[in-house]
Amino acid sequence: MFDKILIANRGEIAVRIIRACRELGVKTVAVFSEADRTSLHTELADQQICIGGPLADESYLNIPRVLSAAEVTGCDAIHPGYGFLSENPDFAEACEACQIKFIGPKSTVIRMMGDKLVARQKMREAGLSVLPGSAGAVETVKEVRKIADEIGYPIIIKAAAGGGGKGMRIVRQERDLEAGVRLAQAEAKASFNDERVYIEKYIENSRHIEVQILADSFGNTTHLFERECSIQRRHQKLIEEAPSPLMDEQARINLCDAAVKGAQSIGYESAGTMEFIATQDKHFYFLEMNTRVQVEHPITEAVTNVDIVKHQIAMAAGEKLAVSSETLKNPIGYALECRINAEDEANDFMPTPGKITELRLPAGPGIRVDSFIYQGYSIAPYYDSLIGKFISWAPTRKEAIVRMERALKETVITGIKTIIPFHLRILAHPDFRAGNLSTSLIEMVK
């Protein structure tokens, strides 16, 4: 096992990793920006080191500063969490060159699966279904129009180096094609410095279902069942649940086996997630792979009793995978996760940085809170608006929803605005209660 791990992240995921390390008996180093000097992860870690100014480019995204922090504090591994440098192949490669263990897959695999065009081709070769669309990047409106005529509208234009909903445009009719292509290319260039885009058939009322993967360096790969992440706003997930209410036993077997097959085909190691688009009649198409721990990993932990972060660290340290699909027969109960964002719904969900003047977080049976906020803490304006996650677990889906509603209603956060009222309206929607989910359901919530 490692002696000391540097956490190259902030917020709730940094706190989550520190807690896992503490249970493993591993010392931790927290890096922080000038804006995060009083953040909870800096208080909980064994050591703390400031790596730059408040902007992410000056600190959390600055590879030389992160690596220097690891070297001067004597760390033998770095955990990147999610976001920031977690899926940056150059960072993983730099860790390898410095002989500091990157807790994640090899840099070559990150680079491969980070290019959506390459990832689609690799999964097609592995036998997974992918959505009809372009074989590679498209550059001209003429190319896009030809493909759209072949596969039919609507289509979705996506950034090849995309992520986080950036560089995506849905086009439902030919007259909007040229504007859609230009806007997607411009956003891809601005977000990823890569203007390549490709085309896929857009599935109306689709469902977003993903499979959690664990894989060690000895060739052992297993899944931890599926999560449904269909409740999204602007391609950003808001509510996730496990297992998916769409699935029956055979569909689960087919999907999870395909996910394991895809991960094995690229020699994947570490925790990762295979994401799929699903139709309402249970046809699944590979979407992308996230080569890191996911924001929504706690709901899988809740229905499997598997600590994903601890397993991820142990596998990176050279240990064999300690769980398998043979030992995990079925999900245990149901779990929901609500992402609590500091945003003002009435103002087009604009972020609401500021000081938390009063705080009461939920507790009680079946409730878990992953967060980094505390009363008196000031939320900085420089980072993602996620301030915490509420996770509910219960023997049935109905009970898990009721517990989540209880948790949301007993929460008090003043000084800033949050989307808790919006979550309550989603949970109360008849289609959500019935499990009739889709990526467009949120548009019906008023």
Image: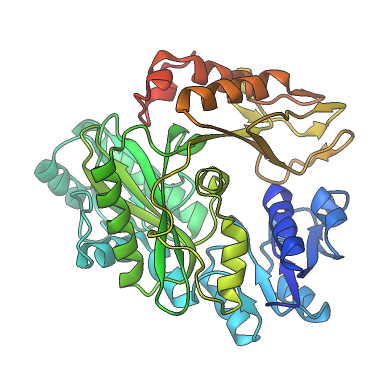
Q: Residue at x 50, y 49 (%)?
A: 304
Q: Give above or below for 134 relative to 357.
A: below
Give the quarter of the image for residue 430. Answer: top left
Colour logic = rainbow
- In the rendered structure, the answer to whether residue 145 lies left or right of residue 437 reads left
In the rendered view, tell whether residue 158 sits above or below residue 5: above
Q: Where is residue 75 in the image (x, y as percent from the top left)?
A: 76, 77
Place residue 127 in its image quadrant: bottom left
Residue 103 relative to residue 124: left or right = right
Residue 187 is situated, as x and y percent measured from the top left of the image, at 45, 48
Whole-percent x and y of residue 339?
60, 35
Is residue 175 visible in the rendered image? The answer is yes
In this view, 445 is above or below 92: above
- Who is closer to the viewer here, 320 or 316? 320
Along the viewing direction, whichever of 427 and 376 lies nearer the viewer? 427
Q: Which residue is drawn at 65% across and 66% down?
A: 79
Q: Is 148 left or right of 169, judged from the image as shown?
A: left
**Left or right: 291, with 78 as reference point:** left
**Would residue 85 be visible to someone looking at this image?**
no
- Whether 241 is drawn above or below 289: the answer is above
Residue ID at (70%, 56%): 56
Q: Which residue of the protein is positioned furthest toward the left in this rendering?
A: 150
Q: Where is residue 324 in the image (x, y as percent from the top left)?
A: 42, 62
Residue shown at the point (51%, 75%) measured from the top left: 320
